[in-house]
Image (cartoon, rainbow, N blue to C red):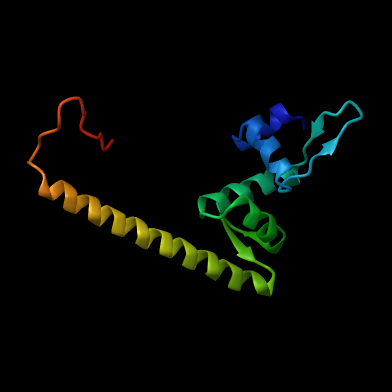
Amino acid sequence: MRIGEMVRRTGVSERLLRYYEEQGLLAPARLPSGYRVYSDADVDTVRRIRILLAAGLSTTTIAQVLPCVRDDGPNLAPVCSELVAQLRRERERITHTIEDLQASQGMLDAVIAAGPADTAPAGLQPISQG
């Protein structure tokens, strides 16, 4: 299938598909004209990439992880023994990031609580939550 069909089937833009290729995550065949030709397996690969991105992994990490995961229903399952340890390290990194963000949120809450209630300085608009 050509790139337009791949976009339709995956919901991923042409730009992102090219980026995945640049990052070594996707390797479509090429016609003599240079056009990319994707397979059904590439559709599955893009789905795995999207899941791993949503899990907070970088494309560099995904390039290492991708060969070691298989589909397990709607989820992914590791097939390489060393992958579980790597994923635990990634989870720990994400946990630390969350803790740092919660600390930042707490500091911002303290600053907000110390200010006057429901008043914004001239020229500033309240931050929308939605």
Side of 110 relative to 20 (left or right): left
In the foreground, 103 or 49: 103
Residue plotted at (20% across, 32% down): 126
Q: Is residue 38 left or right of residue 20?
A: right
Question: Which residue extends farthest front?
Answer: 122
- Above or below residue 34? Residue 62 is below
- Please tell me which residue lies in front, 125 or 92: 125
| Residue lying at 71% horizontally and 48% vertically, measured from the top left | 25
Quadrant of the rendered image containing residue 20:
top right
Figure check: 113 above or below 121: below
Residue 112, image x and y in percent?
16, 46
Residue 1: where, in percent of width, then height? Answer: 77, 32
Quadrant in the picture for residue 116: top left
In this figure, what is the number of numbered marks?
0
Horizontal side of residue 52 vs 91, given as left or right: right
Where is residue 123 drawn, in percent x and y?
Answer: 20, 25
Q: Between 111 and 32, which is closer to the camera in this rendering?
A: 111
Between 105 and 52, the one lying in front of the other is 105
Q: Quadrant of residue 70?
A: bottom right
Quadrant for the C terminus, please: top left
Q: Position of residue 18 (x, y in %)?
A: 70, 35
